[in-house]
DNA sequence: ATAAGCATACATACATGAATGTAAATTGCC
DNA sequence: GGCAATTTACATTCATGTATGTATGCTTAT
């Protein structure tokens, strides 16, 4: 039973991605053998090498499959000029956290990325993509914070660069830690209050100093 | 040249830990060959197997060597009953960030733990220790937040559990991201303002709701 | 429309190298 | 001289990548 139709081939590829995500999460990326992934997907290693050059490319595909929808969200929100920039930031962050809270695959993704993966030279392309995504996201958020300053939602002395770094760190930390133990608290329910807390801090006591700013 | 004196043996062990930290950072823990560590330390693999059972034990030793001083800080601060609990939290966090900013070995440690390491079953003891440390830290911080509520520094309706989760996430995120690119901003200089921002948020709009709280 | 031919989507088998753990050998301190 | 500290040598395991096999879907020409 070889040579499937095009649709079946796509299905095989998809099941490989799903299997890889699972096995990566269980064993860690580096310790994962492609034979395990193949077995989980119900094929042999040959199938993997047909669809992907090697483990790195497989991992990259897994990552892109997971981050694609989030990026779409961000891009969508980046289009329009917002009347309420802070609310936009809040909404974006809330959507990201909500998605994480509700989507099992997303949890698996971030678990792998945060705790089951070594970012070494081998995964250079993934690292580069991560960096680019982060930069784009940070840049967009800082834009929104700048707009927030402009329309009086944030104090005029706000260092929006630092505010953005803090915001991003907060998000990363929340996801990083929550994924470790999803039972710890109900993220979907608490995301709003958690975000509002930081945003309130920004409004009342934003970072001002930045001695090394260029 | 074999059979060193006790002091020399200790020095060998120490240099192995240093070498391991470096190589772990460069290649990632899983991809590190013990032969590389040995070479870096100027010995052979045999020396490693004398001092440590295997790579996991070596990694564990590296971790404990790095987290020991931080734990000491926390333990110290946990002793005294503080008159100004929020300031204590601030000071603890500030010390952690400052140490990270100034101590190259600490940067290497967190770089490894956050980005160059897969927490799989193989490293179960390290994971367990991490969990215990985190739990202790969170518990201590929540105590302090409770005291802060008691003495009016935080609103009486504050959900100190969530506040603690947020605080911890913030710290983790700051370290996680800053270590990726220490040139990005001067952490030692910005840590204070960044912390004050979140703490101000806690004071003005702390998380209240927690539907799933037991 | 259909048969030939080519490309596709895998499976199987193999060769290779690499890292590990251990056992034995070596040397020098106490 | 016995043991501590380390080296050297060895056996084994294991995952990888590749090369080859193969059967089927797809396409084109007639």
Image (tube, coloured by chain):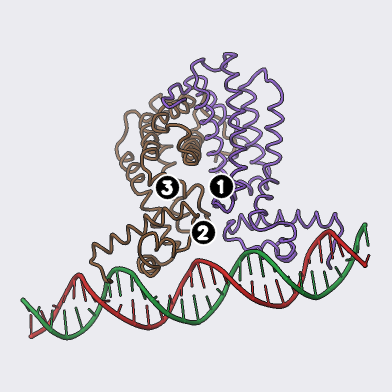
Chain colours: A brown, B purple, C green, D red
As measured in the structure, the alpha-carbon distance from the residue carrying label 3 to the one carrying label 2 is 16 Å
Q: Give the chain of mark 2.
A: A
Q: Are marks 3 and 1 on the same chain?
A: no
Q: Are marks 2 and 1 in contact (CB under 8 Å)?
A: no
Task: Judge depth for marks 2 and 1 and give the one in front.
Answer: 2
Q: Earlier in the sequence, mark 3 or mark 2?
A: 2
Residue pointed to by mark 1: B114
Which residue was labeled with disc 3? A108
Q: Which mark is residue B30?
A: none
Helix, strand or loop status at disc 2: loop
- Apparent side of residue B141 relative to residue B155 in the rendered image (left or right): right
Q: Secondary structure at mark 3?
A: helix
Q: Tell me if mark 3 has few (under 14), some (14-19) or many (20+) residues whose alpha carbon lies within 10 angstroms of its own.
A: many
Residue A64, image x and y in percent? Answer: 38, 53
Label 1 marks which chain's residue? B
Report the residue at 32% width, 38% height from top: A77
B204, A173: nearer the viewer: A173
Q: Residue at x 31, y 61 (%)?
A: A12
Would you identify the image quadrant in which residue B138 lies? Answer: top right
Q: Residue at x 61, y 54 (%)?
A: B25
Write down the residue under mark 2: A30
In the displayed structure image, the side of residue A115 where residue B74 appears, left or right: right
User: Looking at the image, is B53 positioned above or below residue B194?
Assistant: below
Q: Is residue B171 left or right of residue A25?
A: right
Q: Position of residue B87 (x, y in %)?
A: 63, 23
Decide if residue B181 is in sight here.
no
């Amino acid at each position: 039973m070889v040579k499937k139709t095009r649709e079946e081939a796509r299905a095989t590829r998809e099941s490989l991605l799903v299997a890889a995500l699972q096995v990566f999460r269980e064993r860690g990326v580096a310790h994962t053998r492609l034979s395990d992934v193949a077995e989980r997907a119900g094929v042999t290693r040959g199938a993997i090498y047909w669809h992907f050059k090697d483990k790195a490319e497989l991992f990259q595909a897994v990552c892109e499959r997971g981050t694609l929808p989030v990026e779409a969200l961000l891009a969508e929100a980046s289009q329009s000029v917002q009347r309420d920039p802070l609310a936009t930031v809040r909404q974006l962050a809330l959507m990201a956290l909500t998605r994480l809270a509700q989507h099992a695959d997303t949890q698996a993704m971030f678990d792998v990325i945060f705790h089951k993966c070594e970012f070494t030279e081998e995964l250079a392309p993934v690292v580069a993509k991560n960096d680019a995504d982060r930069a784009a996201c940070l840049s967009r958020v800082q834009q929104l914070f700048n707009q927030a300053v402009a329309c009086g939602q944030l104090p005029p002395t706000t260092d929006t660069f630092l505010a953005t770094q803090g915001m991003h760190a907060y998000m990363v930390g929340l996801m990083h830690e929550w994924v470790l133990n999803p039972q710890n608290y109900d993220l979907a329910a608490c995301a709003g209050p958690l975000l509002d807390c930081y945003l309130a801090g920004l409004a009342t006591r934003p970072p001002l100093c930045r001695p090394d700013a260029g």
